[in-house]
Amino acid sequence: MGKTVTFYTTADGKCPMRDFLDSLPAKTAQKVTWVLKLLEDLDIVPSSYFKKLSGTEEIWECRIASGSNAYRIFCFFAGGSVVVLTNGFLKKSQKTPTAEMGKAEAYRRDFLKRRIQHERS
């Protein structure tokens, strides 16, 4: 079955995920691409790479290890098989930053609100 992975874009055309990916070293970007391909191709992605964040509004995280660094990409499902990537960051501590989770939730709300408005017009 698989999933379709897409990037969230703000109303004014900014794409936080593209900015994040552009900031990564080439080797890390390759690893991120590999994990996102797993997300697209596998019906069940191992939790070491993909899991729901507890205490959030349906936010999931892609988990990428590259060298000694841990990267996270937040996303949500828009319909059954569409995964919208919102933002990514280098994880520097055990605790996931609440500011990053808040961004992902705000992006999700904005995406869903604009999708409803688009469907009505």
Image (tube, rainbow, N blue to C red):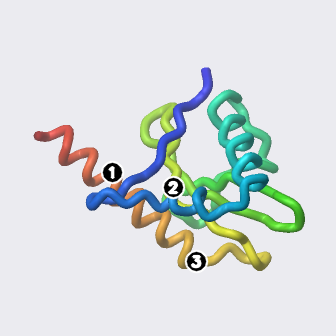
Q: Nearer the viewer, mark 3 or mark 2?
A: 2
Task: Measure how far apart labels 2 and 1 are at the Cα level.
Answer: 20 Å
Residue identified by numbered label 1: 112
Q: Is residue 6 above or below residue 56?
A: above
Q: Earlier in the sequence, mark 2 or mark 1?
A: 2
Q: Look at the image and tell me in which quarter the N terminus lies.
A: top right
Identity of the amino acid at label 3?
Thr
Question: Element at badge 2?
Answer: helix
Q: Earlier in the sequence, mark 3 or mark 2?
A: 2
> Is label 2 in contact with label 1 (beta carbons under 8 Å)?
no
- Farthest residue, direction left: 121
Q: Residues within 10 Å of mark 3 (few under 14, many from 20)?
A: few
Residue at 18% x, 48% y: name it.
Answer: 117
23 or 7, which is in the foreground?
23
Q: From the viewer's perspective, is 113 left or right of 1?
A: left
Q: Earlier in the sequence, mark 3 or mark 1?
A: 3
Residue identified by numbered label 2: 18
Q: Position of residue 22 (x, y in %)?
A: 58, 58
- Farthest residue, direction top: 1
Residue at 52% x, 51% y: name it.
Answer: 85
Q: Position of residue 15 (x, y in %)?
A: 43, 57
The disc placed on residue 98 is: 3
Identity of the amino acid at label 2?
Arg
22 or 98, which is in the foreground?
22
